[in-house]
Image (cartoon, helix red, strand yellow):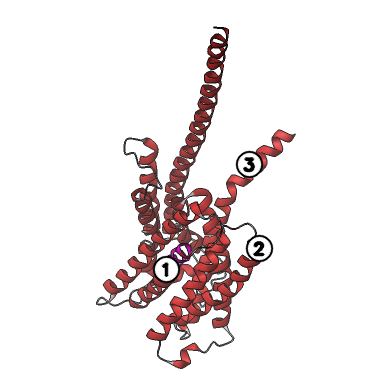
């Protein structure tokens, strides 16, 4: 009975990062819907980013101070500089560039380019030696192929709709939904290149941020402290950017409707919960694991739109989701095998070192006795 409970417990522990990242992507879909609704009413995205990160900082900083003051390592000036640079990449550049890119181009283009995040993260992880890439190894080949397959599946869901497969009896066409935002084009021919450039910069910034978090957490294993200063510095930086970019004083007024709801939702679930879960998963499973969940957001948006908003489910969504899951499973399978191999090799090294130390101690004993006898 005890062995069975231990197996169930270890299985739940292994599944926790998967469930946490799927929940993060679901929360991200909800944030996309609410923020789009708020900005369609005229809310400035510069102001939105400032308010959401400021509220998240107010929540996180006291929690980090009181909950981890006895356990966390000391906070040094070089560490604060790392947090500051991390917020430049993950909040100031990423959030402002992605909203600017959508305004110039379209949500469809932003979703398609967003699937470059796993590729960027995998490449940076290999460059900084966080991931081992052996082209002759079958597992490395599966990880590369799985990443490319997931990206292609997300592109299929973004570009190809196909014939309708399931149509709910109550169609709620009047309500905004994540999947319709993915298929609505607002760009003109002249400015889609500018929008695509902004979105590509945002994707690269997020990948740099994920790699930076992995590097910092190796030497400073306190996720809540990292996320707190990350949001705090990000709110200061975004405030400076907003003061320069947004000259209209009325843009800072927050109406108590969908604007206030979107800011509170973004602060609680888009920043506090999401950033903390991502940092925790990065420390446990690595940066590539976190980035691989990004293409799932398109599939989640399509299925949540079908379930909760009564949207039609098209064949392109089913095919794209199946391809995403196939590539995603390949990467996770290869990574799990590599983790098991590392554990086995570690046990072998420990056993060999212990056996060598015992043999050396046993070989020293007769020599000592012989010398004393002489």
Characterize the local packing of mark 1: few (<14), some (14-19) or many (20 or more) Cα atoms within 10 angstroms.
many
Element type where label 1 sits in the image: helix
Dominant SS type (magenta)? helix
Outermost residue on the top side: it is 374
Element type where label 3 sits in the image: helix
Of the image marks 1 and 2, the number of the one nearer the N terminus: 2
Please state which of residues 305 and 3 is positioned toward the viewer in this rendering: 3
The residue under the point 41% across, 69% down is 88
The residue to which callout 1 is attached is 182
Is residue 76 visible from the viewing direction of this image? yes
Quadrant occupied by the C terminus:
top right
| Picture coordinates of residue 274, whole percent (x, y) | 54, 63
Q: Which of marks 3 and 1 is in front?
A: 3
Element type where label 2 sits in the image: helix
The residue under the point 54% across, 61% down is 24
The residue to which callout 2 is attached is 67
Q: Is residue 255 above or below residue 179?
A: below
| Picture coordinates of residue 127, whole percent (x, y) | 33, 50
- Does the magenta segment cover residue 81? yes
Outermost residue on the left side: it is 190
Is residue 304 visible from the viewing direction of this image? no
Of the image marks 3 and 2, the number of the one nearer the N terminus: 3
Q: Which of marks 3 and 2 is in front?
A: 2
- Does the magenta segment cover residue 96? no
Q: Is residue 179 above or below residue 243?
A: above
In the picture, measured across the screen, residue 3 lies left or right of residue 15, that is right
| Picture coordinates of residue 86, whole percent (x, y) | 44, 65
The residue under the point 46% across, 54% down is 214
Query: What is the magenta range?
Result: 78-87
Q: In this view, does 298 lie above or below 141?
A: below
Of the image marks 3 and 1, the number of the one nearer the N terminus: 3
Residue 10: mark in rendering: 3
């Amino acid at each position: 009975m005890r062995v069975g409970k231990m197996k169930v417990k270890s299985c739940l522990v292994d599944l926790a990062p998967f469930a946490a990242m799927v929940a993060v992507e679901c929360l991200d879909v909800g944030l996309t819907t609410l923020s789009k609704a708020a900005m369609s009413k005229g809310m400035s995205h510069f102001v939105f980013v400032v308010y959401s990160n400021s509220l998240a900082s107010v929540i996180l900083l006291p929690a980090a101070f009181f909950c981890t003051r006895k356990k966390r390592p000391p906070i040094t000036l070089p560490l604060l500089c790392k947090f500051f640079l991390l917020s430049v990449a993950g909040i100031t550049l990423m959030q402002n560039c992605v909203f600017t890119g959508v305004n110039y181009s379209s949500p469809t283009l932003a979703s398609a380019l967003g699937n470059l995040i796993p590729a960027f993260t995998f490449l940076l992880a290999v460059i900084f030696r966080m991931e081992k890439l052996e082209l002759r190894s079958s597992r490395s080949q599966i990880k590369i192929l799985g990443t490319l397959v997931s990206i292609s599946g997300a592109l299929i869901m973004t570009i190809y709709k196909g014939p309708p497969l399931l149509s709910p009896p109550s169609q709620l066409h009047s309500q905004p939904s994540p999947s319709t935002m993915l298929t609505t084009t607002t760009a003109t021919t002249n400015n889609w290149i500018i929008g695509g450039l902004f979105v590509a910069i945002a994707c690269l910034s997020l990948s740099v941020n994920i790699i930076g978090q992995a590097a910092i957490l190796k030497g400073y294993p306190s996720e809540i402290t990292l996320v707190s200063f990350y949001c705090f510095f990000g709110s200061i930086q975004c405030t400076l950017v907003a003061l320069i970019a947004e000259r209209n004083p009325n843009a800072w007024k927050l109406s108590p409707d969908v604007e206030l709801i979107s800011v509170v939702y973004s602060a609680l679930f888009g920043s506090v919960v999401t950033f903390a879960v991502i940092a925790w998963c990065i420390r446990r499973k690595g940066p590539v694991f976190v980035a691989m969940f990004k293409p799932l957001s398109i599939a989640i948006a399509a299925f949540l739109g079908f379930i909760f908003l009564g949207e039609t489910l098209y064949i392109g969504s089913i095919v794209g989701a199946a391809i995403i899951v196939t590539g995603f499973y390949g990467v996770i399978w290869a990574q799990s095998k590599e983790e098991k191999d590392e554990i086995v090799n570690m046990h072998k090294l420990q056993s060999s070192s212990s056996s060598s130390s015992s043999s050396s101690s046993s070989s020293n004993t007769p020599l000592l006795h012989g010398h004393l006898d002489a």
